[in-house]
């Protein structure tokens, strides 16, 4: 472990950097993926979907193999490959039968697509607050936001830790709601012995290029419900052109898209899925090393992992609770970055404060769907509705991106040394 003394001059004040080299980018693609792609290219079959009721409606051999492998890995009855988790969430909301004007409770701390997947069906996102320690949906806030119009909850497993699924599923049962689990950042994380993303009515994982595993772009949805799985497959592949010949009688939300994952991406996914356990284990090793090295720094709160849960550590989430006067979180992160740490962020996001929700304008320029007779008039997005999320974003949260670099133990120690150096010289930041 590298140590820095209180006398060391901070790099932001003209001293030498703790970390003088660029870290190696995180790259999960190897020879196995190259060979798999070449096999697809040699076959000449890059996609085998037909947007009609046909034996090829469900895609080509690699798509089907990837879906079968996902079913086995996650222990679910159905896996539906899609070209992004954004697409998958749209398909999931549609498969649940969400109608225009229905309300779906979502987190303000998630990728924007989690909420816009609701708007795609002219339903209304309602933002509940988050827990201060896991940054996931707060079940108490979820229950407080339920109205007669509420039909579903989308729970995001933010940064790699599962939401409180026992509490959320109990609420859903009590109010006859459906739950979608957005586990984009938590593949391989566990909740009471089961994989995150598999405890809801529908779950989903991202295969976007900067996740634990990836296919460039892509996603996979999982469920044990036969009907939801089939309806997601229909929405994935031009449902409106298929339902007649298929004999589908329930036409609710059978407005389809092209959400199809190709054969090359599926071949990549087959190989990437094999690597997921070891890749998550390495993120956990790095996180444990960071925790041991940083836990003595006053005012820097380390990530919480609930009992019987594991964390996939897409992000290493921390809170800054120092009362040092005159030293802002922004200044501390600037000092850490100057020491050579790459991948730190101050705050996260508050979706309810985006212009889309502040101006309540999505489709056209007349404020649809909010300013229409399908929307409950009391839906509110003003600043203050999610006080925990807002405070964390503005003042306390610090994240380190764990899937940005392929770190050695020595480089993790350098990150710890940079934190030590900055913390030993906080008063000099105040004086500057």
Image (cartoon, rainbow, N blue to C red):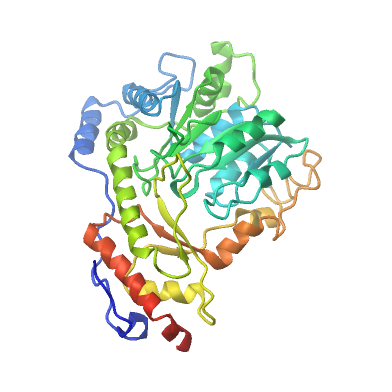
- Identify the residue shown where x is 47% and y is 33%: 259
Q: Quadrant of the N terminus?
A: bottom left
- Identify the residue shown where x is 53% and y is 20%: 225
Instruction: Please say if 393 is above or below 168.
Output: below
Q: Judge whether residue 363 can be spotted in this image.
A: no
Q: Is residue 361 left or right of residue 422?
A: right
Residue 12 position in % (x across, y down): 37, 81
Instruction: Please say if 282 is above or below 308.
Output: below
Marks counted in the figure total 0
Q: In this view, does 310 lie to the left or right of 351?
A: left
* Among the 4 quarters of the image, the one containing residue 244: top right
Instruction: Please say if 278 is above or below 73.
Output: below
* Among the 4 quarters of the image, the one containing residue 167: top right
Residue 325 position in % (x across, y down): 54, 81
Q: Judge whether residue 394 can be spotted in this image.
A: yes
Q: In this view, does 320 lie to the left or right of 73?
A: right
* Among the 4 quarters of the image, the one containing residue 417: bottom left
């Amino acid at each position: 472990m590298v140590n820095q003394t209180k006398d060391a001059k901070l790099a932001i004040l003209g001293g030498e950097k703790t970390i003088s080299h660029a870290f190696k980018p995180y790259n999960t693609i190897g020879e196995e993926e190259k060979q798999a792609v070449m096999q697809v290219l040699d076959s000449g079959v890059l996609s085998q979907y037909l947007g009609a009721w046909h034996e090829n409606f469900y895609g080509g051999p690699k798509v089907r193999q990837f879906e079968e492998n996902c079913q086995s890995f996650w222990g679910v009855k159905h896996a539906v490959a899609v070209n992004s988790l954004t697409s998958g969430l749209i398909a999931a909301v549609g498969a649940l039968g969400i109608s225009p004007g229905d309300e779906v409770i979502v987190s303000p701390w998630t990728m924007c697509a989690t909420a816009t997947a609701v708007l795609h069906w002219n339903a209304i996102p309602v933002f509940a607050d988050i827990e201060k320690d896991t940054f996931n949906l707060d079940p108490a806030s979820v229950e407080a936001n339920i109205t007669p119009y509420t039909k579903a909850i989308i729970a995001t497993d933010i940064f790699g830790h599962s939401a409180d699924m026992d509490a959320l599923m109990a609420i859903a049962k009590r109010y006859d709601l459906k739950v979608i689990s957005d586990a984009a950042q938590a593949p391989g994380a566990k909740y009471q012995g089961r994989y995150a993303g598999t405890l809801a009515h529908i779950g989903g994982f991202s295969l976007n290029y900067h996740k634990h595993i990836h296919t460039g772009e892509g996603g996979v949805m999982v469920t044990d419900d036969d009907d939801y799985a089939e309806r997601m497959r229909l929405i994935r592949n031009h449902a409106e052109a298929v339902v007649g010949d298929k004999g589908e009688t329930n036409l609710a939300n059978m407005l389809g898209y092209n959400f199809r994952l190709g054969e090359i991406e599926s071949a990549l996914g087959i190989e990437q899925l094999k690597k997921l356990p070891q890749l998550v284990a390495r993120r956990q090793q790095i996180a444990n090393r960071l925790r041991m090295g940083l836990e003595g720094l006053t005012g820097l709160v380390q990530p919480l992992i609930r009992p019987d849960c594991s964390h996939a550590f897409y992000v290493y989430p921390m809170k800054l609770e120092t009362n040092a006067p005159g030293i802002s979180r922004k200044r501390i992160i600037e000092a850490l970055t100057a020491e050579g740490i790459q991948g730190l962020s101050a705050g996260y996001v508050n979706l309810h404060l985006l212009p889309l929700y502040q101006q309540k304008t999505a489709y056209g320029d007349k404020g649809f769907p909010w300013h229409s007779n399908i929307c409950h008039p009391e839906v509110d997005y003003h600043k203050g509705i999610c006080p925990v999320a807002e405070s964390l974003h503005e003042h306390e949260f610090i994240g380190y991106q764990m899937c940005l670099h392929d770190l050695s133990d020595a480089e993790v120690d350098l990150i710890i040394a940079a934190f030590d150096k900055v913390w030993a010289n906080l008063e000099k930041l105040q004086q500057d």
